[in-house]
Amino acid sequence: MTRSNAVYKNSVYREPGPPLDEENPFEAMVKRFDVAAQILELEEGFYEYLVAPSRIHITAIPVVMDTGKIKMFEGYRVIHSDIRGPSKGGIRYSPDVNLEEIKALAAWMTWKCAVVDVPFGGAKGGVRCNPKEMSPGELERLTRRYTANLIDVFGPDRDIPAPDMNTNEQIMAWILDTYSMNARRTENAVVTGKPIALGGSQGRREATGRGVMTVTMAAMARLGMRAAESSVAVQGFGNVGSVTANLLNQNGCSIVAVSDVTGGYYNKGGLDITALLEYVAGSGGTLEGYPDAESITNDELLTLNVDILVPAAKEDQITKKNAGNIKAKIIAEGANGPTTPKADEILSDNGCLVIPDILANAGGVTVSYFEWVQDRQGYFWTEDRVNRRLDRMMHAAFEVVFDASEKHGVSLRIGAYVVGIDKVAAALRLRGIYA
Ligand code: GLU
């Protein structure tokens, strides 16, 4: 099903009905958008235009399971904006994927791309499924059919997917192949975060965590904090959390706690990150049973007495229930949407500096942009060049957002929305409204 913008606005976004849950992620995005739009004194029509997704695709995906039975899955792709360029954003596989979440994540991609100044709009996709219970063959068939159903949506100049929660290089390779077989030519720029052997970029896998590290170090410098005296807790030990932990550790910070779906692992004297990474690699991907740590709960991890907290798991982790107990001076959002608007207020009152998702985790899409450029040029960069350029762009974005937040006397989050929305609005003013 494809809904046009106008139909959409009259149905989902504007539909009168019961108020949305306060933790609804799209509402959480709109709340921050409202504040930034007021600061920018955004024209009313622009407000309406910029906040709503441009296109929503919902597609039924039949998959022949290993048992031989057909199972139906629901897939989404939300194009929030293509004002600044082709839309860009990951695809997630998870049992709790839903439209409101994908709409929010798509909008965050729009602001994120604008904040780091990569020439893309924003999109997000997802399939409601439990990838942990599916075989590689089932995942491949799901991915190929999802791609085939959305073949007219994707394209190197239209909409470019990437990995997100529970999707990886292999899944990107299947998207590339399905798209290319239909296009009758190999089109490697249709997707980013793919294997190096298929036109992926050096440094892409580590890019999100590397960017989190860069902005965290920049924030520490602003606050006069020294790495050697700083302790860190990282929620989530997937691609983003594990790389962030490793790089912050290499820069001198002590990582005292990490967690994954199996729980939290705490060592006051500092965890051995190399040992943790080796343990996870040898244990099928989880931290369960890691010996050199005390076991703690997820909530205990978030409220530990640490200097820096990195939520790198999923949305709605820091809420009004636990925000008041958070002791960290800096929160660097590796995940998208880990903090609710109510929690924002509490954290800000307590003087905690939150480096918002649309800045903190923008390293991933920045190197996705580098990957797309390299694919289109057919010329590939060294890892060193990728990392240097990433570092430069993340530093520049941090400074621009920090200055905007000081200028307007607002949080870094609102500063980042102001920077992002301003760029998209400027592009819209130049393009005008096609009639
Ligand atoms: N899924 C990642 C994000 O949320 C990366 C998106 C991309 O590289 O296009 O930023």
Image: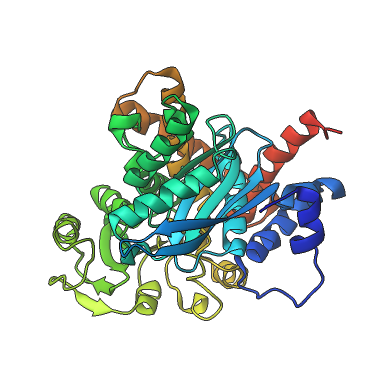
Residue 121 in sight:
yes
- Image quadrant of residue 33? bottom right
Towards the viewer: 259 or 301: 259
- Vertical position of residue 24 compared to residue 2: above or below: below
**Residue 11 place in picture, x, y as percent:** 78, 62
How many numbered circles are shown?
0
Q: Residue furthest front?
A: 68
Towards the viewer: 421 or 78: 78
Q: Is residue 54 left or right of residue 321?
A: right
Q: In percent of the image, x 79 and y 75: which residue is there?
A: 17
**Residue 206 place in picture, x, y as percent:** 33, 44
**Residue 37 place in picture, x, y as percent:** 76, 52
- Vertical position of residue 51 compared to residue 379: above or below: below
Towards the viewer: 411 or 290: 290
Which quadrant does the C terminus fall into? top right
- How did the renderer colour the structure? rainbow
Residue 415 in sight:
no
- Image quadrant of residue 15? bottom right
Q: In percent of the image, x 85 and y 47: which residue is there?
A: 45
**Residue 424 place in picture, x, y as percent:** 69, 39
Q: Is residue 194 left or right of residue 18?
A: left
Q: Is residue 286 left or right of residue 16?
A: left
Towards the viewer: 334 or 303: 334
